[in-house]
Amino acid sequence: MRPGRTLAEALGAGVLVLDGGLSNQLEAQGCDLSDALWSARLLADGPEQIEAAHTAYVRAGARVLITSSYQATFEGFARRGTGREEAARLLGRSVELARTAAEAGDEEVWVAASVGPYGAMLADGSEYRGRYGLSVGALERFHRPRIDVLAGAAPDVLALETVPDAEEAEALLRAAEGCGVPVWLSYTVAGGRTRAGQDLAEAFAVAAGDDQVVAVGVNCCDPAEAGAAVELAVAVTGKPAVVYPNSGERWDARARGWRGDTAFDPARAAAWTGAGARLVGGCCRVGPKTIAALADALSEGDGTETGTGTGTGTEAEAETGTG
């Protein structure tokens, strides 16, 4: 159902459950994501698969869907021979597909247009390092055209996500200024610092006092990092926190595979919301079944808005795949 409130208004009323990893659900549906565009390739070649993946998360209880535009850029599409006009159409389609899935349910569901970091376009794991050797101005110029197109497709919020360093966060916020759509800012972190090794409090401070930012936090990090990061984000910015860690496994960019054990536990969410998180979900390798368990766990607390959280059906079965 299309929301009757802004996302900021909803966050003032309670906690919203985010979806989980999109590409792991797509792989569970039988999609081949070996292309450098990853899940964004399906915007052209299999949009119905993207809509089905979004629908699986709505059925699992997600109240916010993140679009398939994380790795979708004009530069990336150009390498496949896709012109700018068609690339813009595909970026807009990412919002349309999420909106279609969102409106099919009986609960309010918001759409967050994913704006991944510059490193995602490189498809070599650079988003887990940052420090690309580009100036803030150059990064702003890279991000602005895509942000303008995504904002024009009328999502409820832009998800400036998996940001590895504060300089790129500054560039993203500059690029989104005046776009007419609120944003959330979410860093990927390790060892209590940004992936680029910066002080996390200073990184969060980039968003403090910025009225377009409705939430600040972390994603695509080890779940054990999430609690402290949420506390720090709220303390530094005074804004609601967003938190959606990955499964706890680690991405091996060279082998293009995941290593390690799963550590995502929905029971942790109570501590995250207690610390000020108002958008809570999962990232890579967290699928509909886990989001359903998260929705159920959060619905037991006060002030939490979730969907059904049933997690039933074949769409909610798989927890494997990449991304």
Image (spheres, rainbow, N blue to C red):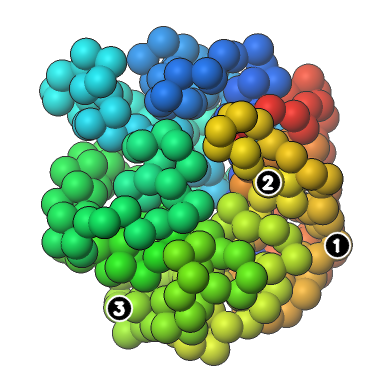
Q: Which amino acid does label 3 sit on?
A: Asp
Judged from the image, the secondary structure of the residue bearing numbered disc 1 is helix
Q: Quadrant of residue 138?
A: bottom left
Depicted 80 relative to depicted 10: above or below:
above
Depicted 48 relative to depicted 288: above or below:
above
Residue nearer the viewer, 202 or 184: 202
Which tag is nearer the camera, tag 2 or tag 1? Answer: 2
Can residue 209 be seen in the rendering of this structure?
yes
Residue holding disc 1 = 267
Q: Which label's residue is closer to the chain start, 1 or 3?
A: 3
Q: Is residue 194 left or right of residue 179?
A: right
- How would you rate the neighbour count of disc 2 (Cα within 10 Å): few for under 14, some for 14-19, many for 20 or more? some
- The answer to the question of whether label 1 and label 3 lie on touching residues, with beta carbons closer than 8 A, is no
Q: Which label's residue is closer to the chain start, 3 or 2?
A: 3
Q: Is residue 129 left or right of residue 75?
A: right
- Residue 22 location (% of width, % of height): 58, 34
- The answer to the question of whether label 2 and label 1 lie on touching residues, with beta carbons closer than 8 A, is no
Q: Which label's residue is closer to the chain start, 2 or 1?
A: 2
What residue appears at the point 48 percent right and 26 percent down from the top-left corner?
39
Q: Is residue 2 left or right of residue 299?
A: left
Residue nearer the viewer, 16 or 89: 89
Residue holding disc 2 = 250
Residue holding disc 3 = 210
Q: What residue type is labelled 2?
A: Arg
Residue nearer the viewer, 295 or 323: 323
